[in-house]
Image: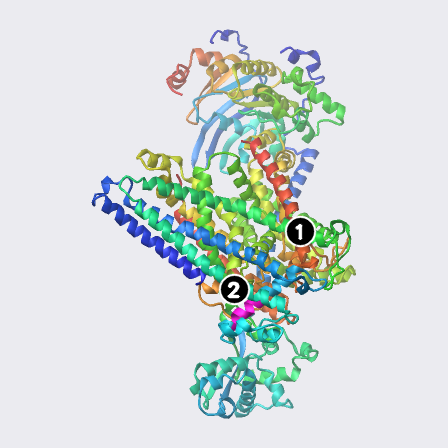
Amino acid sequence: MTDATDPSAQPAAAPQRRSSLLQLDERTRRRNAAEARFRLMGLIAVTIGILAVIGLISSILFNGASSFRQTFITLDVYLDPAKLDKAGTRDPEAISKVTTFGYAPLLQKGLVDTMAAQGIALDGLTAKQAAELISKEAPAQLRRYVMADVSRIGQTVTFDVLAAGRIDGYFKGRVTMESAALDRNVSPEQLMLADRLKEAGMLRTKFNLDFFTAPDASDTRPEAAGLGVAILGSAYMMLVVLVLALPLGVAASIYLEEFAPKNRFTDLIEVNISNLAAVPSIVFGILGLAVFINFAGLPQSAPIVGGLVLTLMTLPTIIIATRASLKAVPPSIRDAALGVGASKMQSVFHHVLPLAMPGILTGTIIGLAQALGETAPLLLIGMVAFVREYPSGPPDGFFEPAAALPVQVYNWTQRGDPAFVERASGAIIVLLVFLVIMNAIAIILRRRFERRW
Amino acid sequence: MSAGILITIVLVLAIVGFVLGRRRAVATAGGDGRRLHSLPGYYGQSVALFAAVPALLLMAVWLFMQPVVIDGRIGEMIPDSAVPDGGSRGLVMSDVRRIADGIEQLVDQGLVSETDLATMRADFTNVRGRLGEVGIALGSNVSPGVFEAAKVYRDANRTGGLIMTIAVLAVAAACFAWSYLRIKPDLRARNISETFVMALLIGSSLVAILTTVGIVASLVVETFHFFQMYPASEFFFSTTWNPQFRGGSDLGILPLLWGTLYVSFVALVVAVPIGLMIAIYLSEYASKTLRSLAKPAIEILAGIPTIVYGLFALITVGPFIRDWIAEPTGLGSSSSSVLTAGVVMGIMLIPFVSSLSDDIINSVPQAMRDGAYGLGATRSETIRQVVLPAALPGVVGAILLAASRAIGETMIVVLGAGAAAKLGLNPFDAMTTVTVKIVSQLTGDTEFASPETLVAFALGLTLFVFTLGLNVLALYIVRKYREQYE
Amino acid sequence: MYDNPLTKRDAVTKEVKISARGCQVYYGDTHAIKDVDVDIEDKTVTAFIGPSGCGKSTFLRCLNRMNDTIDVCRVEGDIRLDGEDIYDPKVDPVQLRAKVGMVFQKPNPFPKSIYDNVAYGPKIHGMSRNKAELDEIVERALRRGAIWDEVKDRLDAPGTGLSGGQQQRLCIARAVATEPEVLLMDEPCSALDPIATAQVEELIDELREQYSVVIVTHSMQQAARVSQKTAFFHLGNLVEYGETGQIFTNPQDPRTESYITGRIG
């Protein structure tokens, strides 16, 4: 300890800064200003983050909320036997030969007649132009209605038909008189007629249940497009994911957490799992295409393939969550079971696993929520196909073409008619509602079963 | 018999096995469970496991291998003359498969009987027309060789299915019988079923390895096929991307890589400062209330599917940037642009960066902060000069992970970045990325065995290697960093 | 270990550096420090002793407002440095801490080079005009910290690579580099081995020539060895404060006596 007394170590002229604490020197003031600036930057960043959340959600809500309401025209249709059942036998087989084209004139006549009865003038429009207010999907609607009960032929029924997409858009503010003047599909006169129908109470905008149940519709009929097939397809895929990923994930985690010796082999598995968790989702799509479709010959667009791909994708998430909750069970529980003579396997399955279950389920739900919103891999396995038929019930339905919610959104964004943007946003709202429900369940589970050891 | 029914039968057999096995165990012990080596349930379990697992495994392997074996055999059958000029055997094979499907449907719907089918010949019957009836559209008329191959293919599939059913049922029954008959009081049933369960546990953890193997194998094999048709040097070094339907495409990856890196760069420029500042503000400055509100609010962003961000880019951010920035300044006129995709992707990455940084900043020991405060450093000085440098490796790791996310992100760029492959600097221009092109090349109408489709696998492999490299590096850095404070 | 000739201690009353009057500290609902009055003298080593949880570290941290960094902590009363209230709203804790340096229980060098560790304080307080001056300050501090000879050849090596005792002396050098007027030490030797402890104690004795040093310690022997004044804390109260020799040989309060003789603590 000689150096401390080394003369050169003594302060040459010990600068005793006897400054007062009560006065901020220039430097401190500058440093405090820098401090305030830094703090402000942080606050701005937080504000941007929160604004981004609000902007994102409000943009979707703003664009999509209207898709839950739809414009309908109420009219009286005479189901003319001369057109629908020429033979007069009421034989469903024969009636089914009449295509939707056969029903269109009935609707046109029904509209004109109902308007006449209400005293609404056509005002220079032809009957055909007036009938363009009705969706192209409406004849199919009417046909289904008739086919459901052929004895309705010959009656005059009051029927709510879908209004055409542009008319619907007019009442939702998407179509204006100015845009109609430039539009091939609709004229301002038709919009005026729609206004008159609305005044007369023939045209109403009401809750649109079909949006949740109807299948997709073609490019020219956005008003009829629904999410039925997509919701069913997504449900099937989630079922596959749940049935495969939960047991596989739990089994793998139990092995790795409770039994696996520490060696190269288990290291390899661990490295694999952590890497798989970070592989871009689209790569899983390529895997699905190459292995499940091209190699194993499973059908394209089928929920089973989607489910398998999503299973492989969510597996790492579930394994990581499960291992964390297994790890949280204190070793004393295991020791207690082993101490009374249980085998290692029994201690895990009888004691550790039930205690870890809430955590596992939470992780699984979060994994499922991730899978539900995943789009990219499904595009590659053909789920973009235009599917109008509902898949049949399980298990055959797993092998039949179906859509999926997020892919349906993508599909609709690729269509020309701007009305599909509304549909896509609406579909996202439905998707987000599902996700919120799933996350809420996960949070409730976590809260309810949270355990402090 | 469909796979579903077969699985159900096997499972029912397993349940029956459990009940019978348990009963037999009790019976052999003369009704006294204490004389048994294990609890009676374990005897049942061992029978059930033996009945179900080998049979189901066999079935899975069979379903997987059958198409491979049959394809191989049919491939040999197709005469060279049936392969059109400029086409490939693979294309013919896919025709064979579709024709076989069509025949199956024709028979199912009763439009053609089995006997008619046996005598049906492509040279006399309009096969293409008949298949059209069931919605199978073919590009050209069916040549006799291909039609015969299709018939054989269909027969082979049916026979294969039948043999599989028999084999699966036989295995299930045999294993059932064997494990049932060997039940004796001193059989160590618990050990047997535990070993079995252990094998299942190990098997499940192998799925992760199998997945990786599957990914690598499918990417490498198809990429190899691609490079047989298209020179690798062109792919890696050509600066044009211009796929054509009828061959002669330019498939250079450089413009796509450029777009990918550019968009990712913009995304990181948005996400890293904001995410990092959010993490700092919330962990060092914010009051408890603000923290408990703002943290979950920002984490909402992490739970939102990317398709939502894509739509946000398409209908809100894209038009906004075009109408308020690009067009007034005359820099661009497209609503999909590098900036649109980059900004939206940046928003997506904010919670990712902020929660990773939050963890990392919090793992810097309090003693380090005290040391700086004790010297009279202000909070921001402590953060910038002590905490951040100490956390730097971890933060770098987090940024690399975010970059790997950005590079592999698909939906946002598909909807926000555009489809034009371009090597440019203007962020208001539409550009395209590797992932966009994987989607467009694999969802188009081109034949599978063409370079235009197979290029997607080469792109996928590039993407995989890139992201894997980044992840490994990032995880390594983060782990090293964690060790430093443990 | 009582072989230190306590009677030789310098008992001349010196100028008061810090004075606390009616100091109360609350952690949330817990009343951690109860009505403490104390005068800490300049150029003196003052030891705070007492059983664990008695509040001695808490009180120490009040003296340079380190408790400000803990959200739930609230300080009341009057603490003056050279007659100026350090809890006055006009006082910037940053400026205060430049005058009242602190050394912590666990050595906590920054993960930077040895040089940068020591230069950090002078840099943020702008104490040097150029690199040469900074070099000089760093060398002086390292010499004062009695570690110069050990590290002069590897100033660029990371501070975290040193041994525990070296790290603590580096931290002391870091604290004295800002030329504080008071140096607070919170159990500076508790993480060190006996040899390193002896080195640090020797250092503390030397630092007394220029600074007012306040040391919190668990070890009564250490307090007896290095301090001139000793304060005994018990359950948040300052029980007794006086000359070290007097506290250890002739305590006035029965609680002090019990503690010193090992009956409580």
Residue sitting at 70 percent across and 34 percent down?
A26
User: Residue B98, can we see it?
Assistant: no
User: Which secondary structure, mark 1?
Assistant: helix
Seen in the picture, residue C109 relative to A334 is either above or below; the reply is above
Seen in the picture, residue A147 relative to B409 is either above or below; the reply is below
Q: Which residues are magenta?
A: B98-106
Seen in the picture, residue A63 relative to A452 is either above or below; the reply is below
Where is residue B394? Give x, y as percent: 61, 38
Identity, as a three-letter code, of the amino acid under mark 2: Asp
User: Residue B214, can we see it?
Assistant: yes
What scheme was used to colour the molecule?
A: rainbow
Q: Magenta stretch: residue B105 in it?
A: yes
Marking on residue B223 = 1
Q: Are marks 2 and 1 in contact (CB under 8 Å)?
A: no
Where is residue B341? Give x, y as percent: 67, 56
Q: Nearer the viewer, residue C110 or A386?
A: A386
Identity, as a three-letter code, of the amino acid under mark 1: Thr
